[in-house]
Structure formats: C-alpha cells, structure tokens
Amino acid sequence: MQGCANDTGKLIGKVAVLRMAMGCADTVPALSEWKRLGALTTKGFDYSMNTVTSEADDTKGLVENLVNNMDFTISGEGEFRKQDKTTEIGAIAISKYIFDEVQAGRQPTVWVRFDFTGEDTGTYIMGYFNTTSWSGDFGTTDISTFSGEWKVYDADTVVFEVAGPALAFTTNLAATKTVAAGSALNMSVAVDGGTSPYTYVWKKDGSVVSGQTTATFNKSSAVSGDAGVYTCEVTDSAATPVKITSVACTVTIS
C-alpha cells in the first residue's frame, strides 16, 4: 500500500536521486540548495577498493587480501534538454562550469549527494567531490546524452547516513473511554523513530483542541461537552516531516 513506513520491497532505481550543489568544502549546503543534476537515465556508485595481497607460506595456498583504501566514485548518465530547468543544476550548465573551472586553472569541484530512497528520506552518501569525467554524445537520430563521474576531493566531508526506524506509536489511544463528569480526562500517546523532537496536535471531532500540545491530553474536570472523538497527530522534525495519526478514541462523559 502506498506510504507504508515498513515497506521492505525491492528498490526501483528511479527512486534514487543524484543531486548537486555549488560551493566550497568548508560549508555544507542547506537542503534548499541541492538540485538534481538533470534528466538522468542511470546513476550509481563504485567503491573501487585498492588492495594488497599476501602470499606468505602460512596461507595454505590461498592468497589473502587486505583493503588499503577505496577510490570512491559516483556516476550518472542522462539526456540533454534543449534548455536546463531552473530547478536542476542542468547538463548544459555543468558542462560550462567544468570547462570554465579547468580553463581557469581551478578544480571542477562540486558537492554531490546520492539519495538511495528518494529526496531527503534519510539514507544518503554526501561529500565534496571533483569532476573526473564528463562527456556528451549527440547522435544524429538519437537523443543527446551525457555521462559524468565524480571522485572524492575532500575525504573529511564524505558521510554515509542511514535513516533510522520510521515514526510509529509505541502507545496508542484506546478506541473508547468513559469518564465521569467532574473527573479528570487524561489520554496519552508515545512514539518512537523518525527525527525528534516531535510536535503534538490533539483534535476533537476533527478540530484542534487549543492548549494541548504534549503527548498527554489533560483536562482536570470533564463536562458533557467534552464528549466526542479524539485523535492525536504527531509530526517529527525531519527535513521532510512525517506525520502520523493515532487511533480515534470515542470519549463518553457519564
């Protein structure tokens, strides 16, 4: 079903996103500064391990391998547009950028971010990279294409982050609750996962209840007008916030 937080199905490649941002290595771009490269048809990464081997006489006839380092590379291929979109870095724009930087004796560096499961979902590789390959192909009867590779320029900037558990209720509301008039009306929820801190919005019959902004709903003395259907909406603090809604609790005042 669409939007299931615990979906473990296979990942389709078009969900992954390759984005870039201009700037220097000492300042990580804000989320608003990242733009897609362009109309990509494929994208990927390669660790390219550099190894040394041991053939010592105690290895029982098997060569042993040790990893020294890795020549980490992010790559992408796509199709040129007649004109770059303003919401993208753009294949034409980056073609000029690379040309200008190298002609000026500078490095064609750029911030690169590879999002595995879609934009700002929390699982990504990001760092300050150098453009080590860029080419275009303009077949007479074909769509014009480009191809590029980016290798690490500043190793201190490279991070690999994996999203934590999805936001979910660990304590939910009961389906029904009966409270005597004059008694306290208390309801609580608890959540885990996502990105804290969380915000809480309590609703009665679909309307926001003012003054109730924590995980616990509390009214010291219930009256007949408090009867109704209550829910609690919890929103996390992710770059793209996630909101979940509790079980609807029907409150009766006796």
Image: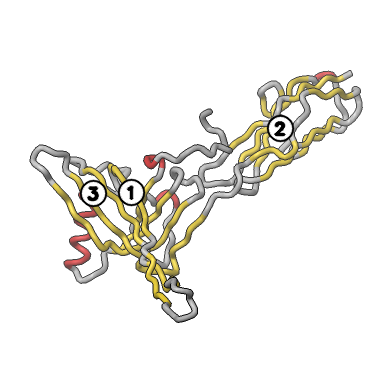
Query: On the picture, is 158 further left or further right than 168?
Result: left
Within 10 Å of the Cα at label 3, are there few (<14), some (14-19), or many (20+) other Cα atoms? Answer: many
Above or below 94: residue 79:
above
The residues tagged by marks 3 and 2 sit, at their Cα atoms, a distance apart of 50 Å
Residue 5 lies, in percent from the top left, at 57, 37
Q: Amino acid at mark 2?
A: Ser
Residue 153: image location, x then y, percent? 35, 68
Going by the numbered disc 3, the residue's amino acid type is Ala
102 relative to 62 in the view: left or right:
left
Q: Secondary structure at mark 1?
A: strand
Which callout, 3 or 2, points to the residue nearer the camera?
3
Mark-to-mark CA distance, 1 and 2: 48 Å
Sequence-wise, the earlier of marks 3 and 2 is: 3
Rendered location of residue 43, percent (x, y) = 33, 49
**Where is residue 149, by image quadrant?**
bottom left
Q: Secondary structure at mark 2?
A: loop
Write down the residue under mark 3: 91
Image mark for residue 210: 2
Q: Could you tell me residue 29's position as x and y percent?
A: 42, 57
